[in-house]
Amino acid sequence: MKKLVSFLKKLVVVLGILMAGLYISGYSYLIELGAKVVELGRTSAGLEDYVYFDSREIPKSDDPQAWPLHADYNSVPATTKLQKLHQDHKTVAFLVIKNDSIWHEQYFEGFGKDSKTNSFSMVKTIVAASLAKAIEEGDVKSFDQKVKTFLPWLKGAYADSLTVGNLATMSSGLKWIEDYENLLTITPRTYITQDIIGVMKTLPIESAPGKHFVYQSGSTQLLSLALTAATGETISDLARRYFWNPLGAHADANWRIDSAKNGIEKSYCCFNSNARDYARFAALFKNGGIWNGKQLISASYVQESITPQFEDGQDYGYGWWLGSHMGKRFYSMRGHNGQYTIVFPNDDVIVVRLGHEQLPDLPDVRYSADYLDYMEEAFAMLYDETVTSP
């Protein structure tokens, strides 16, 4: 018995030393991370993480608007390859919208048209557009306004020259390495932290802003903090007022926050909505910023947002990923594990895919093979419909 007591005392001392070391080294968040890993039973982020974290509710539109169903709704079955893609990568929702009507729709694993799933980085597009709206309303002077106007605590050799536009175009110069696998890096830390502002205050602007494209979730996080300071509204309230309400969102959404006490959104990710409502935002941009005959966001911003801003970022605009495939120009909202909302403006087509997994990125590009596969199979179905329909 004495030996057991002695062992337990030594164990307590060792654990105390380890915990003190984590706090001193700045890795105290690993304690919370470890607790969440035990609770969730996994080490990766998931589609329904909002269940396990605090969140801010975003009520559905005051005037919910149903999507029209196409005359050929679900008349063409998914191709064999598409069915296999869904099975292999655990798709939960797949939507094809043609001429602003739902043409094809499938759900899996018990998910449905109002089921909430994690947007991951798709929401970066909405945060960037929120900046444009704040400029339209006069709360922010221009894309060239300095971030320190709103976040005076910003630090680093180049903090004084950072603009809100730099944040929206991923050219901030922030000290940040985008890494989802290494649990010791900044991205997992911000995902788990209960004090997102405290974490962001530790990160300097270490290189000249506005020079190069470097994709960083931290840039979007800083942008939303600046927007909250500029407007006096949370980014959740802004997103609803600017977009979700006038777009007629059909279901309640929510946005994960760092803690019930602080209530700051994890704005680079963690907006939770459904395939139909994500598609509304895509349709707004496909139609030049117009929804139901009303200009919700300026046509000039829509065009600028889908235009490359840097030579080394030809596939990125203001929150939109840009590209061409099968001879078709597209732009998309994209998120971790294969969350895709893809606009083909010349074809009047939107493709939404939500799910648990994706393939690794292809060599020398910033997208995975399944990203292109979903496009190809959606159009294979559409071409079949075009041939067989009168």
Image: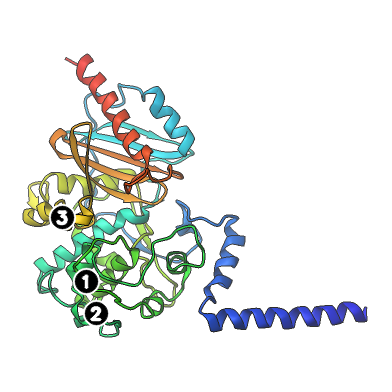
Q: Position of residue 380 (x, y in %)?
A: 28, 24
Q: Indicate the amino acid at tag 2.
A: Tyr
Q: Nearer the viewer, residue 230 or 241?
A: 230
- Position of residue 156 relative to residue 317, above or below, is below
Rounded to the nearest angstrom, the CA distance separating label 3 from label 1 is 18 Å
Q: Nearer the viewer, residue 315 or 284?
A: 315
Determine crowd level at label 1: few under 14, some 14-19, many 20+ residues with C-alpha closer than 10 A: many
- Position of residue 349 relative to residue 212, above or below, is above
- Position of residue 110 relative to residue 310, above or below, is above
- Position of residue 274 relative to residue 149, above or below, is above
Label tally: 3
Discs 3, 2 touching: Cβ within 8 Å? no
Rounded to the nearest angstrom, the CA distance separating label 3 from label 2 is 25 Å
Determine crowd level at label 2: few under 14, some 14-19, many 20+ residues with C-alpha closer than 10 A: some
Q: Position of residue 235 (x, y in %)?
A: 28, 67
**Helix, strand or loop at disc 2?**
loop
Q: Earlier in the sequence, mark 1 or mark 2?
A: 2
313 to the left or right of 55? left
Q: Nearer the viewer, residue 85 or 98?
A: 85
43 to the left or right of 58? right
Q: Position of residue 44 (x, y in %)?
A: 51, 55
Residue at which label 1 appears: 209
Residue 62 shows up from this direction: no
- Checking the image for residue 158, the label placed there is 2
Q: Nearer the viewer, mark 3 or mark 1?
A: 1
Q: Indicate the amino acid at tag 1.
A: Pro
Residue at which label 3 appears: 305
Discs 1, 2 touching: Cβ within 8 Å? yes
